[in-house]
Amino acid sequence: MQHTNNMEAEQKTRVSDGKLTSFTLLVTANCNLRCDYCYTPKHPRQMDRETADRSIDFMFAESDPASPLSVTYFGGEPLMAPATIEYVCKQVLKRAEAEKREVSFSMTTNGTLVDQRNTELIQTYDIKTKISIDGAGTAQDLHRKQADGSGSFSLILKHIDNIRSLPGLTVRMTVTPDTARHLVQSVQWLSDNGFRHVFFTPVVEADWDEHSLATLYDAYHELSPYQKRNDNGMQVSNLQRDYSRLRKGSKREYGCGAAVSMAAIDPRGHLYPCHRFTGYFAHTDDCRIGDVRNGFNQEKRNYYIETNRTENFSGCGAGLFPDSTPSSEGTCLACSLFPVCHASCIAVNRFMTGKPYAPSPVNRILAQISASTSLACCSTDNDTLLTNHSNSNAGGTE
């Protein structure tokens, strides 16, 4: 894509002076794993002290003082830079106390470095933790490999007691075409081993074929009881969320918070709409929306704010809507699947189609699988779900 001045003419830019509430700090671009589906390029660069200070100043200046400030540590693998995390936590808390601001910390980690020292760091600053585990044994080792090519599941087992003690713990499972067959077993393993908050996400960018999609469909339906907590107190939150969204027929002004309520800061201090942009487009100037030293490039930020409005999502096309369908009915907002669809990720959309507001057709298939789980397997409120679907304009589950 070209510079913002030459971006798609049909996208109208509206001036926004909106304050943010959430920031993602990429404290390092380095990682001890080499997951083959990862969208973040690896580099030994870490955020230095000066950039950290500038980032803290920027976050307090650009965040809404009436709302809690959320700081998420990301990478790479953030626990490869524990000193930076501790420094930022101390400085943010000191600043928040002086300004009478609420603040919370979170982190996404691969879990392989959760030794006793890092566990104490996370617990000391009450850092809510999202850990990436694809499942038990083979499901983890197929794609989440160490730098030497060996699997990483043994490292999860090594630190499993520490992992379970982390505050606000959530397990994030990434599902690929070749791990879909392990999904049910892996969720059960997590339940048996004391994990209570789990969600899984299919890799939209992967090469899904008819067989792997059928396998995923079967797994969703087998896991449908996890829309509610099981006897161990575990719930699969994405299944519960999708069911809830279908019941409500939810419509939202923005697809997500990228550039609207959140921004990502890379190790050099460059600003992006969200952390995914720092991975897919780390060296793409028009995806940067400023830097912590000079602030936002408001024109670029406004482009992504406007792109992120659900009214601008163009629909996934590719034969989904007939030529005779009015363009207003070919949009994502008119599709009954949109509440459960991943089409709202403007970073993935741009990566796959070249346009942040134009999703790939695979989103429709994955959304159909999710919707069918709620429609077919939850009879309690089936009438409500079916009514919401029948009242939608286009793109139903037929």
Image (spheres, helix red, strand yellow):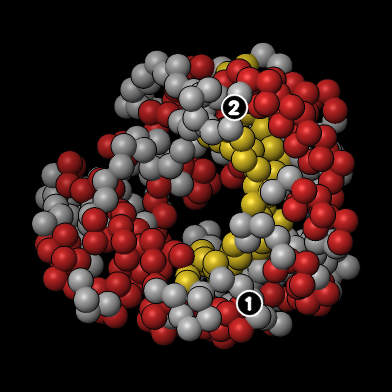
Report if residue 201 is visible in the image. yes
The disc at residue 291 is none
The image shows residue 269, relative to residue 37, as above or below, that is above
Is 10 left, or right, of 189 in this rendering? left
- Which residue is depicted at the point 34% across and 35% down? 309
Callout 2–callout 1 Cβ contact below 8 Å: no
Image location of residue 104, percent across then percent down:
62, 40
Q: Name the residue nearer the viewer: 218 or 62.
A: 62
Q: Which image quarter holds the C terminus? A: bottom left
Q: Quadrant of the rendered structure where residue 272 is?
A: top right
Residue under numbered circle 1: 194
Classify 10 Å Cα crowding around label 1: few (below 14), some (14-19), many (20 and above). Answer: some
Image location of residue 192, percent across then percent down:
61, 84
Give amino acid for label 2.
Arg
Q: Quadrant of the rendered structure where residue 229 is?
A: bottom left
Image location of residue 111, percent across then percent down:
75, 63
Residue under numbered circle 2: 101
Q: Name the residue nearer the viewer: 263 or 331.
A: 263
Classify 10 Å Cα crowding around label 2: few (below 14), some (14-19), many (20 and above). Answer: some
- Which residue is depicted at the point 49% across and 30% down? 67
Is 105 left, or right, of 66 in this rendering? right
Distance between the alpha carbons at the discs numbered 2 and 1: 34 Å
Give amino acid for label 1.
Gly
Tag in front: 2 or 1: 2
- Which residue is depicted at the point 75% across and 37% down? 89
Image location of residue 252, percent across then percent down:
30, 42
Mark 1: secondary structure: loop
